[in-house]
Image: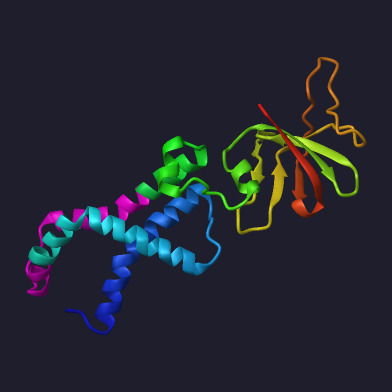
C-alpha cells in the first residue's frame, strides 16, 4: 500500500498515459479544450483506457517486479522496455490519432466524436485544405490571398481557444471594390511576394475557394 508522497507519486504515474496521449494528440490536431478541468477528464479517461488494455502487464509488474524492486534484487531487461513502452505507446497513439483527425480521416470520428472542432472556424481550417481566400473587411475593402504553401512559407489559421486570426502566405491582387481576382494576361491569379495577417475582428465576410 502507498501513503503520503508515495500515494501522490502513484496517482501521478497512473495519469501519465492519458496525459501523454492528450499532449501528443493536441500537438497534431490542436488544443480544443476550454477549461483545465476538461483536460483533466481527458487525462483520467485516456489513462483508464490504457490501463484497461494493458491490465495483464500491470498485474505482472505488481506481482513479480514490484516485490523484487522492494527487496533490492536485480530486475530483468524487460522491465526497462516496459518503462519505455509506458511512455512511447500513448505518445505514438496520440500523435497517430491527432494526425488522422487533422487530415479528416473518417474513422477518427469514432475516437473524437462527430464534432471534434468547437467552432466553424476550426472545422474549416483544421482540414489542411489549400485554396484561394477572399475577405471583405468591415471597412468595405476586399483583400485576398492563398491559403497554401507559397513564397517559402505556410499559411496558418489559429486554433481554439486562441482568437481566430489568419495568416496567408501570399497575397493576391483583388479588386478592392468588387472582390474579383485580378488575373494576369495569361489568365492566372498573380501571387504577390508579401503575405497577409488578418484578425477575424476586422472581417465581415470570408470565402474559401477550395483547389
Q: Can residue 143 be seen?
A: yes
The answer to which of 151 and 147 lies nearer the viewer is 147
Question: Which percent across, then down, holds residue 47?
Answer: 32, 60
110 with respect to 48 (left or right):
right
Identify whether 187 is placed above or below 19. Answer: above
Q: What stretch is highlighted in magenta?
A: 66-92
The answer to which of 129 and 109 lies nearer the viewer is 109
Q: Is the magenta stretch mostly helix, strand or loop?
A: helix
Furthest toward the front, the residue is: 114
Identify whether 11 is placed above or below 165. Answer: below
The answer to which of 70 and 133 lies nearer the viewer is 133
Question: Which percent across, then down, holds residue 175?
Answer: 89, 32
Q: Residue at x 75, y 51 (%)?
A: 200
Q: Can residue 17 be seen?
A: no
Q: Residue at x 9, y 65 (%)?
A: 63
In the figure, residue 65 lies in which quadrant? bottom left
166 with respect to 140 (left or right):
left
Furthest toward the top, the residue is: 186
208 with respect to 35 (left or right):
right
Q: Is residue 81 covered in magenta?
A: yes
Q: Is residue 51 covered in magenta?
A: no
Question: Which percent across, then down, holds residue 177?
Answer: 93, 36
Question: Which percent across, then down, holds residue 97?
Answer: 41, 44
Q: Residue at x 51, y 49 (%)?
A: 116
Furthest toward the bottom, the residue is: 4
Q: Residue at x 48, y 42 (%)?
A: 101
Amino acid at each position: 500500500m502507498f501513503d503520503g508522497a508515495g500515494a501522490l507519486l502513484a496517482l501521478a504515474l497512473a495519469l501519465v498515459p492519458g496525459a501523454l496521449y492528450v499532449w501528443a494528440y493536441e500537438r497534431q490536431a490542436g488544443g480544443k479544450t476550454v477549461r483545465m478541468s476538461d483536460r483533466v477528464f481527458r487525462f483520467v479517461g485516456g489513462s483508464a483506457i490504457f490501463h484497461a488494455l494493458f491490465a495483464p502487464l500491470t498485474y505482472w509488474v505488481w506481482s513479480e517486479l514490484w516485490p523484487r524492486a522492494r527487496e533490492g534484487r536485480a530486475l530483468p531487461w524487460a522491465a526497462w522496455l516496459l518503462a519505455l513502452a509506458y511512455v512511447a505507446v500513448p505518445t505514438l497513439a496520440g500523435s497517430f490519432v491527432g494526425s488522422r483527425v487533422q487530415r479528416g480521416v473518417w474513422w477518427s470520428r469514432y475516437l473524437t466524436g462527430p464534432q471534434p472542432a468547437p467552432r466553424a472556424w476550426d472545422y474549416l481550417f483544421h482540414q489542411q485544405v489549400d485554396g484561394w481566400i477572399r475577405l471583405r473587411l468591415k471597412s468595405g475593402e476586399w483583400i485576398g490571398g492563398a491559403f497554401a504553401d507559397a513564397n517559402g512559407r505556410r499559411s496558418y489559421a489559429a486554433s481554439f481557444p486562441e482568437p481566430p486570426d489568419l495568416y496567408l502566405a501570399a497575397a493576391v491582387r483583388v479588386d478592392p471594390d468588387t472582390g474579383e481576382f485580378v488575373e494576369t494576361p495569361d489568365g492566372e491569379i498573380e501571387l504577390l511576394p508579401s503575405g497577409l495577417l488578418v484578425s477575424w475582428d476586422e472581417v465581415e465576410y470570408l470565402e474559401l475557394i477550395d483547389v
